[in-house]
Amino acid sequence: MDKKLKKFIQNATRVAPKISKKGEIFELRNGLVSQYPQTRKDAIKKTIQQMTVGKDVSSLFPDVLKNIATSDVEQKKLVYLYVMNYAESHPELCILAVNTFVSDATDPNPLIRCMAIRTMSMIRVEKILEYIEIPLRKTLQDENPYVRKTAVICVAKLFALNAELCKELGVLEDLTAALEDSNPLVVANAIAALTDIHETDPTVVPLPELIKDHISQFLLALNECTEWARATILGALADYTARDAIEAQEIIDRVTPHLQHVNAAVVLATIKVVLLNLPIIHVDTQSPIFAKIASGLVSLMSTPPEMQYVALRNMRIILEKYPAILSRELRIFYVKFNDPLYLKLEKIEILVRLVDPANLKQCTLLLSELKEYAHEYEPEFVSRAILALSQLAVKYSQIKFVSKVLDILLELFETRVEFQNDCLISMCNLLRHTGEQDEQLIKQVCLVVDAWDATDTGSPQSDYAKCNYLWLLGQFPAKFTNIESKLNPFIETFTQEESLSQMSLLITVVRLHQSISGQLLQNVLDLATHSTQDIDVRDMAIMYWRCLSLEDADDTLINELCHSVLPEIPTTLDTFSPELLETLLSELSLLSSVYFKPAAAMHRQAVRSEGKLKGKQMHELESLAQGEILKNMNEDNLLDMDTDFLSSNTTSNDTNGTALNELKDLFHLDSSQQPKSNQIEQGMNNLTLNKKNGSQSTNTQDLLDLF
Amino acid sequence: MASCVYFCDLRGKCILSRRYRDDIPSSAIEKFPTLLVDAEQESAVVPPCLSHNGVYYSFIQHNDIYLVSMTRSMSINVAQSLAFLYRLVEVLTEYVKTVEEESIRDNFVIIYELLDEMMDYGIPQITETKMLKQYITQKSFKLIKSAKKSKNVVRPPSQLTQSVSWRPEGIVYKRNEAFLDVVESINMLISAQGQVLRSEILGKVKVKSRLSGMPDLKLGLNDKGIFTSGTDLADGTAPPTTKKSNIELEDLKFHQCVRLSKFENEKIITFIPPDGDFELMNYRLTTPIKPLIWCDVKIQVHSRSRIEIHCRAAAQIKKKSTANNVEITIPVPEDVDSPKFRYFHGSVKYLPEKNAIVWKIKTFPGGKEYSMAAQMGLPSVTDVDTPKSKRPVQVKFQIPYFTTSGIQVRYLKVNEPKLQYQSYPWVRYITQSGDDYTIRTT
């Protein structure tokens, strides 16, 4: 008894490190080599604490390492944690730990075996890696699935650290074999590891074939593993294309129960698999599946806001492929007053997309809801709501509805002074949609805008708003009084304007060249050719100038230019190009689907250490060139989703078209030697061509072709 | 797959971190606070996914901390990363009660251990608290003691990697009981004119299981609920709201212990429950309902002198039922003064920090209608700025022994093949307000 007590006291004794002048590190070192186990453990904890707050305690490495041989699992864990953190700065000392690692990897306790192999494969020290072979092999064949599931991931870690060694050891074959494991968790981790390796170097493992060969195992394992493993397996299933309708149907049937899983990641992954298999199956079996997907999507709206955000971004992609899928669920997406702002904006995006343009009742319902939003106070939210009003009107398209929306916009224009810019843009969108067919609408808008500059706030502020304002002047000059005085302020500030406004001013002035004074025209052309930073504006000005000063007596060319009727815009919602849409659909729930940028395009930005030097130069050049072109295109890039306004503005597209064609010319060096007049002709052709199609995807396609 | 997980304080400064991959420099987190501030300054829109210099930050906020996960690859499953962060919070909550800056700092050892166990190389592993608690415990001295008895007692439970990964074997209770709570939260949006714009019922079935061994449970709900909605979903052709007698439980979501394929095929809810508390299922209903607590608020603003508020509230529920803890929060402009209230029921308070008055009624019997009037002075000098936000009236309440949807538990059969014991299921029902039971103001 006495002995026991003594031992207990010895074990439990804690000598609190005293604060002395020699500093904390000294005290910690003292503690680490103390004769009392509990004191040593406390000292390790303190050391880790220091490490956590970012202090450099690497000088204690040898002392901490001494504590690695212990039967106390927690202490072992702490030492391992420490070693992992500092191994890089003390490679020579790590050798001391190797023996412990290797022997721990054969410990009877699976927890310790796991920890040893996990830590060993994380240490970025070549010498350690030399010793990894035997423990790794052993643990890959361990009888305990808990150890096996850890070991398969270690293969991926090893591959990332030293791919050559990994191939040499032949553990990749073991990893592949793990797909046959009886334990679903091991299978799932093996898939994750293989996916990771495949991403780094697609040549080492034939992932698609492996998935193909194991489809039935995956489907079986799906029902028996943890939620995360399910998500991983579903991810692998999404990479597989079913052979025929029957198989696709089977996959869908097997995964759909997971739409009812509580984990949002599993639900989203399931939706992805179902959507990818949907086109393959028979059309008549599709509709019940749509109902299930819809309910799965809707259920994601009762998750935390961040999850909802991901879900909403994904829905935007899904809705573009299947616009009717959520059309019964309008109310779910109504904005809640305590939603974070980013959620409110996304919800509006979804609302205007899912609304069924054939359903007047629903459109009216949404209209009153949007009107409510337009009376809120967060500026971004109100702006978006005002834009959404016009998007809804354009979508429903019927003239009576449009004029109803216009009335709301006009009212907002009067009452919400700080949002007049947004109202202006929205109203112009409406006019662009209805074209010239409704005199009444045009009259109403022009009347308000004409009177606008008499008020205190009477001038457009943002680049878009200015551009629209100028477009309105150029399009319906008869409706305005005193056009020159309206144009003059823009000419005065020409050099400070952004390129879109410069361009619009130029176009408007040329359009009106017959009705305004020659002085003003001359002035603008001068400014646009000499004082602009933007090459597109300059080129365009030169072109117009030449056209105007052509000796030809017949003005057909210039008349054609000035009186061309703009196409009516069918929609003001931004859309993806078909290729992008397909790519994004296959990348649902991935980060790329949140940014709307395909992963493949962004993937190699993070070049791994080997390819870094080589990759960098090329990449830099590429991004430089890309940046330049993007800038010239008024940041009008299909990949950028904020271009909804631009897409409705063919004038800017015209210039993009010409700029691109010029760039193309540059690339085909021989064609750049053409006589100048010829070039202008060509430019003109391009101009009218682009005017007609006015679609962005061609531009982007060109852009992509250039590389 | 996430490269690392960081805990940061509200200013974005790192408290604790665990790096799973070394493709992101440890300096990347230092950029996080600036990213937050930049995003906020630019447009006030701060989405939960930010990027800088090829590093993608996904984060959630909980109490006074941010949980950030970072990656370099666009092809990671972001839904999974965010779901993992939420799960992490859940698990930590069970370990340290409240997850906040202080508790993170105090419990760094156990948090490191958990982070190690819950994620490996960015791949989420075991996140079931009940199981984690089997081998990651807070009382470290216990480990020493047991370690002395036999060297390796702390082992990962073998169920961890089996198909029932959420329940350890060998649980014994003297009295075998299962408690079921059916909780329905009502979300409702009512226009200023009193029209119901949106309503939904969010239902949950919470279970507290105190059962021995490995019991297999079968839950029967009134087939009106589960059964018809099941067939509805299955053939997808039945028009949803034509038959009034049918409840359409939409989007049933089950805890991972429920055999999903069995439900899909046979519409039977069977499961082996985790031990202790868990949420068995949740569902949503969008059948239009009338407001349970009807509330009509008239606000009259006499510019620069005073504001008058008249509020009438009625409990539109059965006479037998009562609504408890009814709380009606009415927004008022900033800087109002000398509030005067007239009321006969409950209590009214002005909360300057929330710019609102709150009318609390402890018990509100069904069918009754109460009213309240308030008058407050407005500051004679005001900013020209319009008010910053337009807030709705919020209503909170609880109605016990009652579900709006009419869902009922018919039976809960417990079958433990080996022990064959008698067990007692208990069921409670409650309806309460959701987090969005609001009435718009004009």
Image (tube, rainbow, N blue to C red):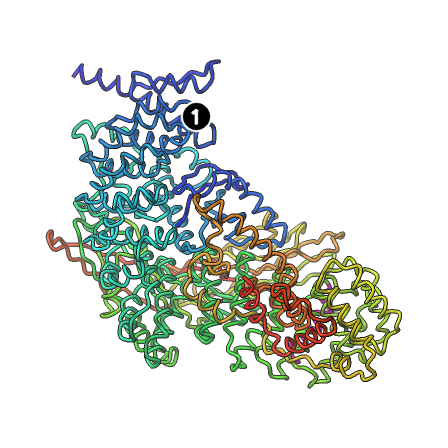
Residue at left 73%, top 66%? A539
Say which amino acid is labelled 1: Val
Res B344 → quadrant: bottom right
Q: Is residue B148 above or below residue A702?
A: above
Q: Is residue A612 above or below residue A97?
A: below
Q: Which residue is mark 1?
A: A57
Number of disc labels: 1
Frontmost residue, B203 versus A146: A146
Q: Secondary structure at mark 1?
A: loop
Q: Is residue A385 above or below residue A182?
A: below
Q: Is residue B347 left or right of residue B186?
A: right
Query: Principal SS element in the magenta part?
Result: helix
Res A150 → quadrant: top left
Task: Point out the stretch of residues depicted in magenta.
Answer: A403-417
Residue at left 70%, top 58%? B386
Q: Is residue A414 magenta?
A: yes
The spot of residue B176 in percent (x, y) is 19, 50
Give the crowd class for mark 1: few <14, some 14-19, many >=20 residues within 10 Å.
some
Subunit ID for the residue under disc 1? A
- Which quadrant is the N terminus of chain A positioned in? top left
Frontmost residue, B25 versus B360: B25
Residue at left 40%, top 70%? A294
Q: Is residue B279 above or below residue A96?
A: below
Is residue B120 at all visible to an observer of this figure?
Answer: no
Q: Is residue A521 left or right of residue B427?
A: right
The spot of residue A644 in percent (x, y) is 60, 68
The spot of residue A477 in percent (x, y) is 80, 78
Res A639 → quadrant: bottom right
Is residue B95 at all visible to an observer of this figure?
Answer: yes
